[in-house]
Amino acid sequence: AFEVVAQQSGVTVMVGEDQTIVEALSAAGIKVDVSCEQGVCGTCLCDVLEGIPDHKDKFLTEEEREDNDQIILCCSRSKSKKLVLDI
Ligand code: FES
C-alpha cells in the first residue's frame, strides 16, 4: 500500500494492493475522469508534485515516464511510500 496526497483537495488516502488510485480517491469523494481505465487513452492523466510513480500505462512516452512528473491514475502505482498529486 502507499499514500496519495490530493494536494488541491487537501485529502490523503491510502491505496491498498487491491485497488487503483482512482478507486481510492473516489472513495474519499474525489472524482477522477476516466474513460478506458486501461492506461491507454490518457483521460486520467495527472501532474505529480512529489514522489516516484510506478508507471503501468501505455500512454506516456519513455521520456515522460522518466520525468516522473505525470501519472496515469487508472492503472499506475507508486514506487515511493507517498505520492503527492495536483488534484
Ligand atoms: Fe484511459 Fe486512464 S482512463 S488512461
Image (tube, rainbow, N blue to C red):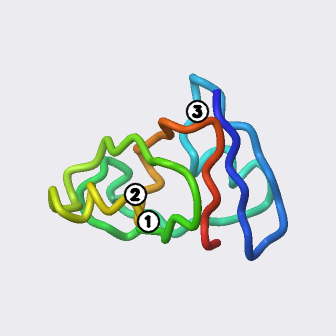
Give the alpha-carbon distance from disc 1 to disc 2, as whole Å. Answer: 6 Å
Give the alpha-carbon distance from disc 2 to disc 3, as whole Å. Answer: 14 Å
Q: Which class describes the residues within 10 Å of circle 2: few (<14), some (14-19), or many (20+)? A: many
> Secondary structure beneath disc 3?
loop
Q: Which class describes the residues within 10 Å of circle 1: few (<14), some (14-19), or many (20+)? A: some
Question: Residue under circle 3?
Answer: 19
From the top left corner, tell me how far across and down residue 20 is, in percent. Answer: 54, 40
> Secondary structure beneath disc 2?
strand
Q: Residue furthest right?
A: 10
The disc label shown at residue 72, or none: 2
Residue 82 is left or right of residue 11, and the answer is left
Q: Residue type at mark 2?
A: Ile
Q: Nearer the viewer, residue 82 or 31?
A: 82
- For residue 65, what is the image quadrant? bottom left
- For residue 70, what is the image quadrant? bottom left
Residue 42 is left or right of residue 34, and the answer is left
> The C terminus appears in which quarter of the rendering?
bottom right
Q: Residue furthest bottom?
A: 8
The structure residue drawn at horizontal position 55% and vertical position 38%, both measured from the top left corner, is 80
Q: Residue furthest left?
A: 62
Closer to viewer: mark 2 or mark 3: 2
> The N terminus appears in which quarter of the rendering?
top right
Q: Nearer the viewer, residue 49 or 34?
A: 49
The structure residue drawn at horizontal position 47% and vertical position 55%, both measured from the top left corner, is 73
> Secondary structure beneath disc 1?
loop
Question: Residue under circle 1?
Answer: 44
The earlier-in-sequence mark between 1 and 3 is 3
Q: Residue type at mark 3?
A: Gln
The structure residue drawn at horizontal position 57% and vertical position 46%, both measured from the top left corner, is 21
Residue 31 is left or right of residue 77, and the answer is right
